Image (tube, rainbow, N blue to C red):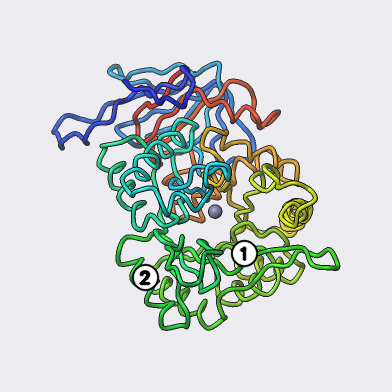
Amino acid sequence: MKRLRALGPALVLLAAARPAAPQSSNPPSVTVIRAGTLIDGKSASPRRDQSIVIRGNRIESVGDTATVAVPASAKVIDLSRATVLPGLIDTHTHIFLQGEDPAEGGYDVQLLKQGLAFRAARATASARRALEQGFTTIRDVETEGAGYGDVGIKQAIEGGYIPGPRMFVVTRAISTTGGYPLEDYAPEIDVPKGAQIVDGPVEARKAAREQLDHGADWIKIYVTHRSWVDKQGNLVSQPTFTLEEIRAIVDEAHGWGRKVACHAYNGVGLHRGLDGGCDSIEHGLELDDASIAQMVRQGTWLVPTMSVYYDHWAPEDTPEGKRDRKRAAVHGPSLQKAVKAGVKIAFGTDAGGFSWKEPIAREFARLVEFGMTPMAAIQAATSRAAEMLGMSGEIGAVSPGAYADLIAVSGDPLQSVQVLESVGFVMKDGRVYRGD
Ligand SMILES: [Zn+2]
């Protein structure tokens, strides 16, 4: 049993990391979870007094506790005073970012001074932190200069060497010259970039091929970069790729059966991203009516990452401070319009963009504040996120055949989504990682 120094004493991982057990001929163990209330990730309303029968790493059946047959050998976990939900899914994380404090060198210092082993060690702690908070799956959308480190962390989790969520990884991400930090160094100095930089459709396609070849589950591109407030008080964001470049990347990824996540704020870059066939819009700070209609038509996902834009603003009287306030001011109404229009929404937070010590689930309250019902917000982090990841029925649902990824909270998240910030029980793949 090990403890993470940064975490409170209550956060104890129950299962020590160890390599996956060799295949044995023993029948898989059976566990029954008694749930006082079950929110299954798909149904419109919760159900009381349910029992979940788990065989090995999969859910075998779900039914009324009064009638369900419990095998004699089953281990029973009593959560009859708690609300049980599917393991949560955060579709926008950065385990290789640590909410860098500008006072400590900010973003740049990690690319310039921190070796990859150090960064991988911290990413390992971040992955574990996500799992402890009940996030049993993440889509990690860029290593920020740490190359293919996310593929390695994912392999270590899958091999049972370290605890962590199921991971979908994008590896290096792609942007254009002038489209990603590190920036503002003397032009004579070659500095590393946080993303793979390409120009022209040939380089764009080649980068996508390289990343897919080295294990990217998704491709992540930046279709907007810098943003500022113009003289009229509007938020403006700099477009990066040409439509031709975006099409080359999307075409390549789709050919591999993979999808493309597009960081996009607003304006020209956002429209090019949608015209180019982006599968998810990340952030989408200011979706105009035309882009919302296009997203509905094309079935494009929105991963709004609200809360990160509402905290940590620069001082009010600086250009950055004005920009930060403007971003937040347009973001809420934009999400409200998207929700109303029926845009498909998946839960994502940008964790790593803020410290992993802060609760990931803080995002739920923002989603509810801007027009989602608590149940819709929960589904965005369960069955809807699973749908976006092509994992419907496997994760994000408490139903027969799904992986046994389950969490529990005390209290009713439909009354107060904030209770999701205090997850007390975490099971992933049939194994208990937390049981306060
Ligand atoms: Zn991000």
Residue at horizontal 63%, vertical 36%?
A: 362
Tag 2: Cα neighbours inside 10 Å, few (<14), some, or many (≥20)? some
According to the image, label 1 marks what residue?
A: 264
Q: Does label 2 or label 1 sit earlier along the sequence?
A: 2
Q: Position of residue 187 (x, y in %)?
A: 50, 72
- Residue 256: which numbered mark, if any? 2
* 383, 150: nearer the viewer: 150
Instruction: Tell me if residue 159 can be seen.
Output: yes
Is ligand 1 closer than 8 angstroms to the Cβ of mark 1? no
Image-quadrant location for residue 310: top right
Residue at horizontal 41%, vertical 57%?
A: 145
Mark toward the viewer: 2 or 1: 1
The disc labelled 2 sits on which kind of residue? Trp
Q: CA distance from mark 2 to mark 1?
A: 23 Å
* 53, 177: nearer the viewer: 177
Whether the residues at callouts 2 and 1 have beta carbons within 8 Å, the answer is no
* Quarter of the figure that contains the N terminus: top left
Q: Position of residue 335 (x, y in %)?
A: 72, 54
Secondary element type, mark 1: strand
Against 429, residue 306 (above or below) is below
**Number of on-image labels:** 2
Secondary element type, mark 2: loop
Against 362, residue 301 (above or below) is below
- Residue 113: which numbered mark, if any? none
